[in-house]
Image (spheres, grey):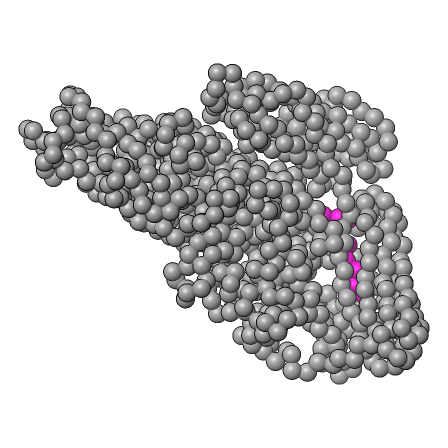
Amino acid sequence: MEQSGSPFSAPQPRPLPLINHVPPRPHTFHLPAASPVPAVPTWLLDSALLSPAPPPGVMDGPRSDVGRWGGNPWQPPTTPSPEPEPEPERRSRRGGRSFWARCCGCCSCRNRADDDWGPEPHRDRGSGSGRRRPDSRGSDSRRPGSRASGVNAAGDGTIREGMLVVTGVDLLSSRSDQNRREHHTDEFEYDELIIRRGQPFHMVLHFSRPYESSDRVALELLIEDIVYVDHEDWRQEYVLNESGRIYYGTEAQIGERTWNYGQFDHGVLDACLYILDRRGMPYGGRGDPVSVSRVISAMVNSLDDNGVLIGNWSGDYSRGTNPSAWVGSVEILLSYLRTGYSVPYGQCWVFAGVTTTVLRCLGLATRTVTNFNSAHDTDTSLTMDIYFDENMKPLEHLNHDSVWNFHVWNDCWMKRPDLPSGFDGWQVVDATPQETSSGIFCCGPCSVESIKNGLVYMKYDTPFIFAEVNSDKVYWQRQDDGSFKIVYVEEKAIGTLIVTKAVGSNMQDDVTHIYKHPEGSEAERKAVETAAAHGSKPNVYTNRDSAEDVAMQVEAQDAVMGQDLTVSVVLTNRGSSTRTVKLHLYLSVTFYTGVTGPVFKESKKEVVLAPGATERVSMPVAYKEYRPQLVDQGSMLLNVSGHVKENGQVLAKQHTFRLRTPDLSLTLLGAAVVGQECEVQIVFKNPLPVTLTNVVFRLEGSGLQRPKILNVGDIGGNETVTLHQKFVPVRPGPRQLIASLDSPQLSQVHGVIQVDVAPAPGGGGFFSNAGGNSPSGETIPMASRGGA
């Protein structure tokens, strides 16, 4: 059967063959290759399962985390205890309603006794026999005179003599069949039909008698063609690639980690469809990528709807998993599918990684994007407002806006028929719950083009995202009468670098230019002022002082966790007269969200600058000084302020830097072959002079290793340990095996190795539903230990 439309749409579970009770007098009929059939929005065609929501209260409050919003004591989110029993394993879809009976009007003669039709209203967990089970799509009820016998009937279920009756449908659905290979869905670990738009697909119909020229066979499908990506290399990267890089840290100290998206792993497609079911999304709406992506941005976080992940920025992860410890999306999604309960815990890169998995699995071209120096505007002013007292010391109780060291979200590609012309292409979707949109914690899709030009009246959520990438940092000083005056506007402090993984390589791709015009250009200033005019402080740019003889720059050495460090401020007099600067330095630790701890070290100094002179002011910081203060991500914030005595110029600067953590070293011991056991060695050296307690390793890789947790106990100060782990590859080709380490004393430790897997002898792949490994933890003895 020929499909028209665009390639690489959303995949869908196998449409099951329609089995008829009429004794077969088989005639095999291939539908003509040229038959014009509308393209299929395949996420519309099947529902993985429908399960009622867990009890209310299994989610955290919107302002519960001290690392996310200042001034609010954190209370651990409620998580179910004890954990509920896993829901029953889902039976094969062969026992359920057929694809055609569920999707095609002419094949949907429904038995009134059938209670498995369409979404069921959400009910509380444990509501008894009325609750629909995940495997209740249908039992073996297609018997003579039942559901299938209505097909080709006269409307009353009667099959008349001589009528052409479908006795079977072969959808050529196995992973080795033509459909799966040609539609690039053979990597899905399912033996069910998964097809994409815009390419021919084939099926074989079996009839009760020979097909005659007067017979008519009709197939009705739906049209959907607004997620087409006209670049083969983009489709390979943004739809088919199962792993990627996520960037974090600061603009000057960029860290990167490999993330296992695993969209083809067994169970992930079921989880993605379950998410749509859980939200109660109508099947008819699943062909609209605007609606689908908006629903996913809401459902990947747990607020409002008990979605996939519970956010936690407190630093206390004792009731779940430290967000830094995750190495991919598979374990998270399978846990949500298995239990129906939100998974603890996530932060922005975890929300974004899971969103990439879900949208790629559903066929939307999606990438994970990091914005460095990402603003969080809390008052819709579209500026980042920072308040200081008369001596230029930060007034933290007034500083509700924050600048995240980095923030991670998603771009997905689609047309926007709901917007004026010119706003198709990349759209921002952000599942991290920051602010509500129409009363729900979701964000996007928002056209990147509207962000670039400051068109903040375009839907969805453009004002908030614009402020994240292109607002100005405005410094306000308290005056003697208690009022505040703008003393400095920093125009190049927000959205300083926006990056994603490059197509076809592990290099960074700088995409800042698609989000904003060049900094300082006329077009960029126009975009900022256009956006600010629609904000809550439209006149913020009307009165600004601008005496700027003295320039200031902040430098921090490449600091390593566990070692001493030095921060420096460089002052330059660009004027023709001597200048005297009173300088204040305040150092504190900070969460990556911009929420700071108390100042633990400060320095004050007066510097006299001759015309054209440059002076460096340094402040050393010992490990013993910052160790008690450390929070997640190992970041520090240096607030620098100064006053030029001669002309009243105010100097202000915030500089964030992070402490680097070590990498895990992974080495493959021997060749990797599908279906054959191989071994990997993991080596780690503790960089700290203190013991790491309760150390946990995670290991995961699509086609290689199902998510696995390794409990290794304690690792002494400056000690080196070596682990050996065996795994059995299930799919050939280049694969990524990813590992992480987490302990209360040290996190954000990762490692990755590429594994080139050879096909099994004799060809073909090896597939196991269980993947051969359980995510449950096991205690692993360390092979060797060494000193510093």
Q: Is residue 429 above or below residue 389?
A: above
Of the 4 image quadrants, the one containing the N terminus is top left
Residue 133: % across, % down:
37, 34
User: Residue at position x 72%, y 34% from top?
Assistant: 664
Asked if residue 777 lies left or right of residue 153, the reply is: right
User: Residue at position x 52%, y 26% from top?
Assistant: 731
Of the 4 image quadrants, the one containing the C terminus is top right
Q: Is residue 787 above or below residue 351?
A: above
> Which image quadrant for residue 91?
top left
User: Residue at position x 77%, y 35% from top?
Assistant: 692
> Exactly how many numbered labels are in the figure?
0
Residue 583: % across, % down:
87, 69
Residue 694: % across, % down:
72, 33
Q: Nearer the viewer, residue 777 or 573?
A: 573
Residue 105: % across, % down:
21, 43
Inspect the magenta stretch and tell me whether residue 344 lies in it: no
Seen as rendered, the residue at the extreme left is 161
Q: Nearer the viewer, residue 24 or 327?
A: 24
User: Residue at position x 64%, y 61% from top?
Assistant: 495
Q: Which residues are magenta?
A: 630-641
Q: Residue 569, can we see it?
A: yes
> Which image quadrant for residue 554?
bottom right
